[in-house]
């Protein structure tokens, strides 16, 4: 008996629907496997006065993943453990095998008169925390980029390398000895270079520093005042302390007091380096300074630009940051000074964006972004 036409029609319709569903599922599964994970991060732009979370997308494949990064239980996060994960993730990224030098200077016609004047007036010594294994992986790229704009550049390591060169501090490597390396490094600077600079900057070999902006920030601050500046954390130390990775800069008076410290006034090893320095400075009467610009935007940063602009901070940061852990396009100063967790490759990217990329015909003028007030917190 031949099937009725209606049964054939229903069978054909069912088969078509089944094929469409199967094809849709297969296509969706394929897209899930190949597309990068996209995460929306809510942030607020004070200049635009609108919520821009729907338009800001962070590609999580570009970031080092942190365990429990977005959990609600922020109080239980372990800062030290997460910091190690950041560093380990950065170390696994393959960078340039050789240092690179841009060779288009002859085509630039920038008026550098103001920057050159500040270079002569605001003398900054930079010392960079590094290690023997990082000299060719990281330190050479600091030397090839922002380091050359310091008035004096020093690399501090556990052992001396006369060809690079580095200054050997005779301290064992490892995060548990970062405090000792920092104390010895600043002692060495004070003993040998006190008269060669007015400000003394500590940075890591994965920190990027814009020296022109640092000098402008310091241009109306007296280096004979006991003060230091950086990315301010509000916990543990009563006056706060500065992120080690974000870099911090001591005035000449601060360095003098540091070198003149008495035995047992400061912790000499162990613990967290930035906390130890913060407690030491407080004991010595050195004040933590405020570095926000005239619009309340940050200048020293303990993460990379994309994290500060898009959000995605680790959990501990929300209770540590002194200024509310803001993110967004309106949170970072036009005259930003430092960024941290910068891979060697991204160090050259920043070098290009800051010193080479230009919109044709648009001549930038200087801005007045320093706060005309006492800059101690």
Image (spheres, helix red, strand yellow):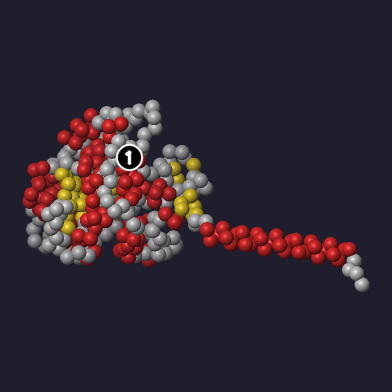
Classify residue 304 as left or right of residue 266.
right
Is 338 or 87 nearer to us in this picture?
A: 87
Is 241 or 4 nearer to us in this picture?
A: 4
Q: Can residue 147 be seen in this view?
A: yes
Classify residue 258 as left or right of residue 330.
left
Determine the image quadrant of residue 224: top left
Determine the image quadrant of residue 8: bottom right
- Quarter in which the N terminus is drawn: bottom right
| Residue 82 locus on image (x, y percent) | 34, 63
Label 1 packing within 10 angstroms: few (<14), some (14-19), many (20+): few
Classify residue 333 as left or right of residue 271.
right
Which residue is found at the position 38% from the left and 44% from the top? 331
Q: Can residue 185 be seen in this view?
A: no
| Residue 77 locus on image (x, y percent) | 37, 64
Relative to 210, residue 85 above or below:
below
Q: What element carries label 1?
A: helix
Determine the image quadrant of residue 162: bottom left
For mark 1, what is the residue?
Answer: 354
Relative to 29, residue 370 above or below:
above
| Residue 370 locus on image (x, y percent) | 28, 36
Is 261 or 181 nearer to us in this picture?
A: 181
- Residue occupying the far bottom of the picture: 1
């Amino acid at each position: 008996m031949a099937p009725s036409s209606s049964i054939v029609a229903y069978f054909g319709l069912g088969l078509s629907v089944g094929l469409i569903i199967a094809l849709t599922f297969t296509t969706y599964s394929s897209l899930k496997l190949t597309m990068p994970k996209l995460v929306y991060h809510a942030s607020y732009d004070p200049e635009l006065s609108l919520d821009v979370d729907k338009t800001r997308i962070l590609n999580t494949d570009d970031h080092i993943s942190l365990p429990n990064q977005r959990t609600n239980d922020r109080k239980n996060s372990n800062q030290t453990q997460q910091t190690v994960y950041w560093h380990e993730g950065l170390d696994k990224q393959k960078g340039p095998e050789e240092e690179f030098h841009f060779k288009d200077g002859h085509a630039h016609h920038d008026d550098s008169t103001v920057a050159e004047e500040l270079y002569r007036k605001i003398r900054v010594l930079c010392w960079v925390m590094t290690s023997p294994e990082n000299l060719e992986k990281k330190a050479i790229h600091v030397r090839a980029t922002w380091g050359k704009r310091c008035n004096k550049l020093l690399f501090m390591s556990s052992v001396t390398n006369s060809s690079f060169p580095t200054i050997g501090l005779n301290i064992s490597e490892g995060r548990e000895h970062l405090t000792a390396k920092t104390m010895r490094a600043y002692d060495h600077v004070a003993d040998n270079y006190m008269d060669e600079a007015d400000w003394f900057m500590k940075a890591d070999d994965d920190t990027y520093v814009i020296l022109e902006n640092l000098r402008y920030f310091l241009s109306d601050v007296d280096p004979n005042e006991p003060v230091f500046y950086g990315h301010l954390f509000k916990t543990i130390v009563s006056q706060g302390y500065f992120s080690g990775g974000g870099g911090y800069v001591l005035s000449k008076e601060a360095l003098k007091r540091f070198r003149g410290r008495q035995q047992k006034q400061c912790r000499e090893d162990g613990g967290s380096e930035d906390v130890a320095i913060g407690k030491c400075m407080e004991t010595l009467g050195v004040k933590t300074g405020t570095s926000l610009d005239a619009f309340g935007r940050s200048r020293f940063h303990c993460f990379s630009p994309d994290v500060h602009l898009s959000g995605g901070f680790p959990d501990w940061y929300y209770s540590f940051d002194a200024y509310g852990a803001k993110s967004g396009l309106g949170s970072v100063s036009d005259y930003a000074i430092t960024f941290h967790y910068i891979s060697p490759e991204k160090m050259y990217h920043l070098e290009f964006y800051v010193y080479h990329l230009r919109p044709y015909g648009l001549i930038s003028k200087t801005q007045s972004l320093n706060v005309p007030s006492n800059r101690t917190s």
